[in-house]
Amino acid sequence: MQGTKVVRPFPFFRAGARASQPQLAKPILVLEDVYKFFRPDQPTLRGVNLSVERGEFAFITGPSGAGKSTLLKLIYRELRVDEGRVLFCGRDIGRLTDKSIPFLRRNLGIVFQDFRIIDHWTVYENVAVALEILSMPQRLVRSRVAEALERVGLAGRGAERTSNLSGGEKQRVAVARAIVPEPALILADEPTGNLDPHLAIDILTLFEEINTTGTTVLFATHDHSLISKRDHRLISIDEGRVVEAQHGLKQWPGSGIHTLVG
Amino acid sequence: MDVKSAMTRARRGLREERRLYIVAVTSLAVAFLCLGATLLGVTNLDAAATRWGQSGRITLFLKDDADPQDIAQLRVVLEGLADVSEVTHVTPAQARASFLEEADVGADLSSLPSEVFPASLEVTLVPGVTRERSESIASRLAQFRAVSDVESYRSWFQKLDHLLWGARMLAVGLAVLVVFCVVAVIGNTIRLAVARRRQEIEVMKLCGATNGFVRGPFVLEGMFQGFASALLAVLALLAGYLTLHESVDGTLAALTGSRVVFLSAWTLVALLAGGALIGAIGSAVSVRRYLSV
């Protein structure tokens, strides 16, 4: 590492012991009265207030089109809030300049339903790209990628082309890419949407394991079979409004799961 | 931007898009070849003009009634000049004989009388005398009583100058055209490459890549295309030169007194560096336009 510049603009965002005590005490993510409009008369998100603590695991759920992906896009600044504030580690990300957005994203790990991995690259290349962006030395990249692949159960398969992998394995590569820079927060947008129920549970378990190391995870899904198996915090979005339960469906108010996921 | 990482990714990009880039490089090499060939023409014309300018000649046409003493005095003056290496007196009979020997007009000119041809003094200047100095000597010699007219071959030099100017303008025009070609072809190639690698770009953006990180490899790929095209053109030109120069050399030496020369080292460096620079500019313009990151 000596003599090589490693770009970590906000080191205090990172998971684990690097954050100071006052920072650890604050919520990692706060949404204050957030509105997002795609049509002037019909907000997709209306007055969303939300606070996520460091190290939390939370499901974000709701029917298709409810605004789950929109909420996540506001966090990784694919979209900008129309009203309200989104604070990540106390910083209003709605006010970040375009040049600062990459530095925000270096502190996030993002996983999608459609994997978004490059088929003609190898498994190693797909994961290493997240570290190459940080100008990390190759020696360190190799060891960190090997470690990440081991965590997702793909140890020793770095040389394989991702086009030869199954759907579940591709999603594991995407998860490895998300965790390899040790982000403070992982945003998973329907990561099990393209997988069969057995693989979906595997992937959920993988995210839970990642969460146990101190990484905050926001897991968006409309799969009630997954939600019902765990007691994580539940954030439901319906018609742009948020309803919460701290310990899964057991504490869910109202008439049960059908009101939750449509 | 990490240059090493950009180069690694550019190498990968070149490998993945090699067919696209081979077509682009070949097309651009033709454009560079046209420019190189014109520059070669200019270089050789320039060499011939320099050679002619330095091996100066002046012809003093003498009056029919010139006093032989005046002619002798004029020869003494001429031979005393440091810039003059040789003075030859050509009589009307010698001029007529020489004309009949060299002329090839397809008519019988043997009936022409000697009086038609004026006597003259052929003055050969020492090598290295500039054209301006030659003009100055000619205008001074015109003052002598025995001299009716002076030919310093100024019109020949003017014609050569015009030819050289035309060739230079052609080279400049071609250079501008080549710049446009390179910018357009590389721009479009990069545009296609950007479209084909949109998913990679999206992934890199989501991982926190800066604009420089994403654009860097494309600029390097454009730079490589420009350089490779120029290099290919130079090599083709060199191959052509090596193949033809022996057969052309003798003819050219007989016509102009100078031998065929290849492009100077500086011109070659300028062509290669220019190719790389224009390639990088064309690519940078294209990624700025088509790659919103």
Image (cartoon, rainbow, N blue to C red):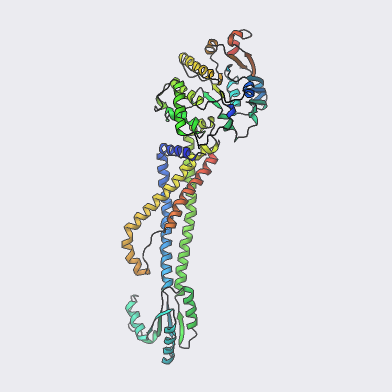
In the drawing, does residue A122 fall left or right of residue B250?
Answer: right
Q: Quadrant of residue A101?
A: top right
Q: Quadrant of the C terminus of chain B?
A: top right
Percent across and percent down for residue A71 are 60, 23
The count of marks equals: 0
Q: Can I make out residue B108 in this image?
A: no
In the drawing, does residue B144 fall left or right of residue A257?
Answer: left
Q: Residue visible at 39% across and 28% down?
A: A159
Percent across and percent down for residue A50 are 65, 19
Q: Nearer the viewer, residue A157 or B17?
A: A157
Q: Nearer the viewer, residue B98 or A72?
A: A72
Q: Nearer the viewer, residue B107 or B279?
A: B279
Q: Residue visible at 48% across and 79% down?
A: B137
Percent across and percent down for residue B93 are 35, 86
In the drawing, does residue B96 fall left or right of residue A139?
Answer: left
- B106 w.r.t. B199: above or below: below
Q: Residue visible at 66% across and 20% down?
A: A48
- A53 w.r.t. B154: above or below: above
Percent across and percent down for residue A156 are 40, 24
- B279 w.r.t. B256: above or below: above
Q: Residue visible at 33% across and 57% down?
A: B242
In the image as oriented, which residue stretches furthest toward the front? A2
Q: Can I make out residue B246 in this image?
A: yes
